[in-house]
C-alpha cells in the first residue's frame, strides 16, 4: 500500500509499505508475557501488529499531528496479516512456528505469487520466501521422481506379463509375485 500525508499541501512525503515488522523477544519481556506461542511477540507476528517497514518513494516531512492516508493499494489480496500468517504463521511446522522461522503456510503457487511482489521487502520476507520456494520446488521434484519410481515398481509387480520381464534377480526381488505365479511364469515344478 502507498500512503501520503492527508491534504498533501504541508508535506510531499510518500511511503510504500514493504512488509510487516518482525518483533524481537524484548516485546515479551517488556509486557511480562510468556515466551513462545502464548506471548505478545507471537501474537504480534500472527496479526502483523508489530508495525511495518516502508520504502520512501518521495521525501517529505512528517510531524506530530499529520495523518497518513492510503492512496493506492496495488495488491489488496496481500494484506499485512496474510503476509505474516503465510510466511511466519504456519502452525503445521510447529518447530518453525515456535521459533519464529519462516515456513510457508499456503500453496506453492501462492508462494510464487508472493515472491514476485515488487513491493516486498527483501530482509526477513523476500529472501526467506525465495529460499522456501527453492526448497519447495526441489521437494516437489524429488517427490515426483519417487512417485514415478513407485508407480513403475507397482506396475511391474501387478502386471509382470506386460513387457520385458527382466532377469531372474529382478523378478525374485519383486515382493508382489507369489512363488506359484513365478512357477507358472518360468515353468517351475512344485511339490504340494
Image (cartoon, helix red, strand yellow):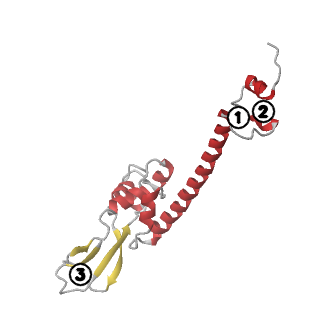
User: What x and y, as percent, mark residue 161?
Assistant: 70, 34
Comparing marks 3 and 2, which lies closer to the viewer? 2
User: What x and y, as percent, mark residue 86?
Assistant: 40, 57
Name the one closer to the observer, 33 or 153.
Answer: 153
User: What x and y, as percent, mark residue 133?
Assistant: 51, 61
Position of the N terminus, as image quadrant, is: bottom left
* Left or right for 183, reference 91: right
> CA separation, marks 3 and 2?
81 Å
Residue 134 in sight in this render: yes
Q: Which residue appears at 42% of the width and 72% of the height?
A: 121
Residue where numbered disc 2 is placed: 172
Q: Earlier in the sequence, mark 1 or mark 2?
A: 1
Residue where numbered disc 1 is placed: 161
Q: Which residue appears at 32% of the width and 63% of the height?
A: 79
* Left or right for 88, reference 80: right
Q: Is residue 178 above or below residue 38?
A: above
Q: Is residue 145 above or below residue 10?
A: above
* Left or right for 4, reference 28: left
Q: Which residue appears at 38% of the width and 73% of the height?
A: 119
Q: Earlier in the sequence, mark 3 or mark 2?
A: 3
- Residue 168 lies in what quarter of the image? top right
- Residue 23 lies in what quarter of the image? bottom left
Q: Earlier in the sequence, mark 3 or mark 1?
A: 3
Q: Secondary structure at mark 2?
A: helix
> CA separation, marks 1 and 2?
14 Å
Residue where numbered disc 3 is placed: 63
Comparing marks 3 and 1, which lies closer to the viewer? 1
User: What x and y, as percent, mark residue 14?
Assistant: 28, 81
Position of the C terminus, as image quadrant, is: top right
> CA separation, marks 3 and 1?
82 Å
Amino acid at each position: 500500500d502507498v500512503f501520503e500525508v492527508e491534504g498533501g499541501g504541508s508535506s510531499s512525503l510518500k511511503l510504500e509499505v514493504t512488509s510487516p515488522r518482525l518483533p524481537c523477544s524484548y516485546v515479551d519481556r517488556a509486557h511480562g508475557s510468556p515466551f513462545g506461542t502464548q506471548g505478545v511477540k507471537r501474537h504480534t507476528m500472527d496479526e502483523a501488529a508489530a508495525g511495518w517497514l516502508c520504502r520512501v518513494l518521495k521525501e517529505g516531512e512528517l510531524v506530530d499531528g499529520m495523518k497518513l492516508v492510503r492512496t493506492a493499494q496495488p495488491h489488496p489480496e496481500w494484506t499485512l496479516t496474510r503476509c505474516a500468517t503465510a510466511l511466519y504463521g504456519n502452525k503445521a511446522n510447529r518447530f518453525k512456528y515456535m521459533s519464529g522461522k519462516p515456513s510457508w503456510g499456503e500453496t506453492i503457487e501462492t508462494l510464487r505469487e508472493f515472491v514476485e511482489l515488487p513491493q516486498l521487502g527483501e530482509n526477513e520476507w523476500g529472501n526467506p520466501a525465495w529460499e522456501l520456494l527453492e526448497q519447495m520446488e526441489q521437494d516437489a521434484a524429488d517427490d515426483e521422481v519417487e512417485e514415478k519410481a513407485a508407480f513403475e515398481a507397482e506396475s511391474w509387480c501387478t502386471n509382470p506379463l506386460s513387457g520385458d520381464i527382466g532377469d531372474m534377480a529382478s523378478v525374485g526381488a519383486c515382493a508382489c509375485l507369489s512363488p506359484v505365479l513365478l512357477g507358472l511364469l518360468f515353468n517351475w515344478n512344485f511339490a504340494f
